[in-house]
Image (cartoon, rainbow, N blue to C red):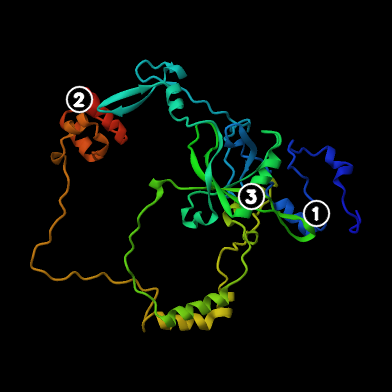
Amino acid sequence: MHIGHSFDVSLFYRDIIYVDDDDATTLPDPSENFEELLIRVRSKEVKKRALQRIPLSLGPGLEIGVGVYCLVREAKKPSFVRLDQRSNEELKTQTRHICEDTGTELMPTDIKFYQPFGGEKVVFEKEEVTEMKKFGEPGLTLMGFKPRSRVKKHCYIKPSNFIFPDESVVKGSSSLFKVLLDRCLARDIVAICRYIARQNAQPFFVALVPQAENLGENNLQVESPGFHVVFLPFAEDFRTLHFEESTKANTEQIDKAKDIIKKLTFKYQPDSFENPVLQKHYRYLEAIALEHDEVEQVTDLTEPDIERISRRAGSLLEEFKELVYSDGYDPEQKPGAKRKAASNAPSAKRPRSSSEDVDVEAEARKGNLKKVTVPVLKAYLKGVGVSAGGKKQDLIDAVNEHLGF
């Protein structure tokens, strides 16, 4: 095809390319040059699919249908598949539970769950455990509104999601969603909601942070209108940290460090740095699939460019070293061991806990065996002539069985 002509995918290939039955699914623009085509071939295809389609409840009898999307996710190696050595076909894994006493296969109805309490095992059915884990139906429930400034960066606990109206859940959701988004943007507020992603999932408090539509060059959409679902921490997630005071830098050292930062600052673009581990993994797969003798080398762009750093800030780095480090400092030399202060008094040893200090039977009656260490449990079982090993829970079960709890 001539380079001056544009490729129209709808003439033929539109009918033979599989696409999702989704209103948001669009066909990619065709590549217009060889370099762009090569980049596209080497890029992993990522489909735009909703994680969940759930209702957003604003009040009794008032719901909005939304789709939950993931904007950013860590790229990982694909999971491996076990193949048969002879036929090279995929193996299917089956799990069976066998009774230790009778050797017969256990059915799902034969398996029970228990929780130790007060020295006894409280037995639950699977349906009871499932019901205890259920906190409500999946969806977002509006709790109230807060100023946007109340959402702090240090309250980050996990990556956020993004919600967009979905007419397949509730008809007319787009209109009401737009009104809610416009009002939140105008008042600079966020919506606080209770979020349950799926059945039996843990509930979270989330802040719906509004985002307006952003159009770039040629009137193309850069950012979609919608809400970022920011997960909020619970009270137990906050910790009080204590730091030891360290030596503080003086003004001259700080100013020199600022000069170095200015010299080495560049415009960061995430798509300019590939993950070297993933790239090496796919290069090996490519070599095996295409039966190549050699694997294509991968350039690790995450390694520092020493030549560029020396060229731009070499003299500043030397001046910074003279300001921070003392004369004769050798970074390759390991620090010597510190000498202990001479003293005639004998050094005090830390008291070590032994099995004699812990009354295992008393702790078992209280149901506190989980607080007893593994060596103490093993010493007690050895003293009463019971052979047991394995994990700590196995030792606890052996103690309870011996004492009849």
Q: Secondary structure at mark 3?
A: helix
Say which quadrant the C terminus sits in.
top left
The residue singled out by tag 1 in the image is 31
Residue 302 is situated, as x and y percent measured from the top left of the image, at 57, 63
Q: Nearer the viewer, mark 3 or mark 2?
A: 3
Q: Secondary structure at mark 1?
A: loop
Q: Toward which corner of the image does residue 58 lie, by quadrant?
A: top right
Q: Nearer the viewer, residue 298 or 75?
A: 75
* Residue 403 image label: 2
Q: Nearer the viewer, residue 233 or 110?
A: 233
Name the amino acid type tagged 3.
Arg
Vertical position of residue 26 compared to residue 400: above or below: below
The residue singled out by tag 3 in the image is 183
Crowd around label 2: few <14 · some 14–19 · many ≥20 (10 Å): few
Q: On the picture, is 201 further left or further right than 170?
A: left
How far, Cα to Cα, is label 1 from label 2?
Answer: 75 Å
